[in-house]
Image (cartoon, grey):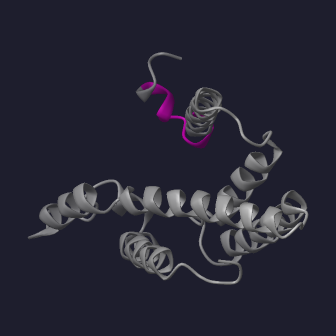
């Protein structure tokens, strides 16, 4: 398997990227409010139906698939490097650093919604975990990371808009 690509994974990854592009096209062309409501520019025929269909069938679904493929690809690459006697962690860290550089540049220069920097940071964090953790410990790490992300998102929301605090009554 060394040097070979898994065509099925590449195909699924390509489908996920195209679907993410289709979902994010609204963010490329329209104001940020358009992603939150189909009525951002008033009542328009068919806007609500398209918005609801996009929300139910696409929005967020393909990011999850892409994230799963990112993790699977990372695990397969690490195993392949270890089998070849290469420094898997070091090689992966270098890849994540470059992904972070590209993601930061893309976020600053092209589109504020880019997620490559986030993938790079998560990839670096995962590289720091001890290898072969039990499923129970991985679930614990994942739970802590998800809760930490929710707290960070809530905090950023509070700082980004003075009106947001009214929507978070628990603070």
| Residue 57 drawn in magenta | no
Q: Taking 83 as reference, is 11 left or right?
A: left
Residue at (79%, 50%) from the top-left corner?
127
Q: Quadrant of residue 71?
A: bottom right
Q: Nearer the viewer, residue 136 or 102?
A: 136
Q: Return the x and y of residue 82 as percentages of the image width and height.
A: 82, 62
- Indicate the quadrant containing the N terminus: top left, top right, bottom left or bottom right: bottom right
Q: How many marks?
A: 0
| Residue 163 drawn in magenta | yes
The boundaries of the magenta stretch are 158-166
Q: Is residue 42 visible?
A: no
Q: Return the x and y of residue 154 as percentages of the image width and height.
A: 55, 33
Q: Nearer the viewer, residue 157 or 151?
A: 151
Q: Taking 154 as reference, is 101 left or right?
A: right
Residue at (70%, 35%) from the top-left corner?
133
For the stretch drawn in magenta, the main secondary structure is: helix
Q: Quadrant of residue 87?
A: bottom right
Q: Nearer the viewer, residue 143 or 151?
A: 143
Relative to 39, say whether 28 is above or below. below
Q: Taking 132 as reference, is 84 left or right?
A: right
Q: Is residue 108 visible?
A: yes
Residue at (34%, 63%) from the top-left corner?
34
Q: Taking 19 as reference, is 73 left or right?
A: right
Relative to 8, say whether 33 is above or below. above
Residue at (37%, 73%) from the top-left corner?
19
Find the residue positioned furthest to the top: 170
Q: Return the x and y of residue 115 as percentages of the image width and height.
A: 60, 62
Find the residue positioned furthest to the left: 45
């Amino acid at each position: 398997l060394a040097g070979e690509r898994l065509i099925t994974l590449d195909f699924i990854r390509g489908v996920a990227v195209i679907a993410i592009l289709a979902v994010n096209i609204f963010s490329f062309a329209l104001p940020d409010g358009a992603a939150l409501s189909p009525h951002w520019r008033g009542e328009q025929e068919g806007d609500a139906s398209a918005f609801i269909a996009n929300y139910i069938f696409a929005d967020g679904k393909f990011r999850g698939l892409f994230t799963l493929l990112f993790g699977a690809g990372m695990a397969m690459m690490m195993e392949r490097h270890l089998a070849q006697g290469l420094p898997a962690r070091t090689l992966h860290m270098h890849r994540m650093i470059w992904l972070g550089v590209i993601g930061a540049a893309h976020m600053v220069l092209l589109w504020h919604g880019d997620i490559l920097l986030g993938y790079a940071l998560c990839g670096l964090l995962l590289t720091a975990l001890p290898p072969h953790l039990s499923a129970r410990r991985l679930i614990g790490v994942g739970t802590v990371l998800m809760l930490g992300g929710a707290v960070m998102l809530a905090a950023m929301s509070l700082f980004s808009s003075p009106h947001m605090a009214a929507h978070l009554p628990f603070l």
